[in-house]
Image: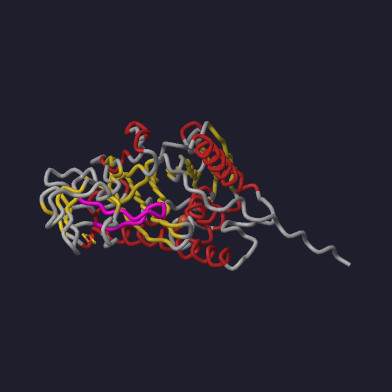
Amino acid sequence: MAKPRARPKAGMQARPFLRNHWYVAAWADEVGRQPLARVVLGEYLVLYRTEAGTAVALENRCPHRNLPLSEGRLVGDTLECGYHGMVFDCTGACTHLPGEPAPPRWARVRAYPVVERRGWVLVWMGDPDKADERAAPDYNIRLADPAWWHVKGHLPVKCGYRLILDNLLDLSHLAYVHSSTTGNRALAEHATIAAETEGDRVRVTRWMSDIPPAKAFVDYAGYSGNIDRWQASEFMPPSYIYVNSGTAPAGRGVSPAERMRSQGLWGFVVYHALTPETASTTHQFWAMAIERRFVPPAMLPEFERQMINIPLEDVAVYEAQERAIALDPAANGDVRPFGMIAADKGLFAMRKILQRLYAEEQRRA
Ligand code: FES
Ligand SMILES: [Fe+2]
């Protein structure tokens, strides 16, 4: 009689959040003179801009009777609660309590450090004394490059953030999830995969030589024969991913050293910032950038439509995974794999880093 298959162990761990990090809370154009409510790491924030244009993030809960301050209104650089009129300044201090001579000591909300980086509004979710602007992610350079076109989005996703990191560290899924545009079977079947860890970063490169081009590479790059293709994903804690994708006619690909940065004759980059909203929901901020010369202006509307659709195809996958995980009482809120395949090496390395950083943060707390 066949031996029953051993049940895998519980998921790698319950879902910790690293707190002493910068997280993208919004795109810069989402934050203005209208208070914006957003949940980040399970905390309720309100974001707005001062009259001078500086982004501010405060706790979105009035200390009086808990109305979200985002329901109130901006008065100059201050936020007035929409219930009984307490007024809070950018530091979270109450500057006015109607009918009282002075605001009581308890009348204040938490203020979060904020920085902006090429369209990202980032908030520091940990100890404010540890907030270091130099540590804010700065890799989304093409979003400010006039030679590059980009499209961006913010997707509220019903899954834990690590499932999205998994997705981006194993780009073989293009063959199955994005087969109408950037993927084809050859991409999954004929790749040499390398996963390296350097400090807190994980880099996964996939190299495919002499394969047929996927549809988007025929349509936009004009390939008719086989190509060399490379994909590189880099994970940076707590939850950032940079993806580089390049191609060249077969036999003319680039050296391993160039695969992280070069697009060859046709390719693009994608920046992902994954901000946990709750344990099982995530804000996915994404932007795809490509050199303007790679897409003829007449083809740009269709190209843009396809690029916006690709992340939606992924969302359908990881939201379905999350539903399966939620129904697994032993999952502990995470993937509970029976085993590991070669393409999972980067995913495991990423999770190991998250676990180590979380343990370090807990030790120092
Ligand atoms: S709930 Fe905000 S002032 Fe009363
Ligand atoms: Fe994808």
Place of residue 68 in the rendered image (x, y in percent of width and height, measured from the top left): 27, 60
Residue 259 as seen in the image, left or right of residue 268: right
Place of residue 239 in the rendered image (x, y in percent of width and height, measured from the top left): 45, 45
Q: Is residue 365 visible?
A: yes
Residue 195 located within the stretch drawn in magenta: no
Q: In what quadrant does ligand 1 lie?
A: bottom left
Place of residue 38 in the rendered image (x, y in percent of width and height, measured from the top left): 32, 57
**Up/down of 194 relative to 285, above or below:** above
Residue 95 as seen in the image, left or right of residue 323: left
Q: Toward which corner of the image does residue 119 lie, by quadrant?
A: top left
Q: Toward which corner of the image does residue 4 lie, by quadrant?
A: bottom right
Residue 213 as seen in the image, left or right of residue 36: right
Place of residue 109 in the rendered image (x, y in percent of width and height, measured from the top left): 28, 49
**Front residue of 92 and 348:** 92
Identified at 26% across, 41% down, the residue is 144
The secondary structure that most of the magenta stretch takes on is strand
Magenta region, residue range: 36-49
Residue 45 located within the stretch drawn in magenta: yes
Quarter of the image with the N terminus in it: bottom right
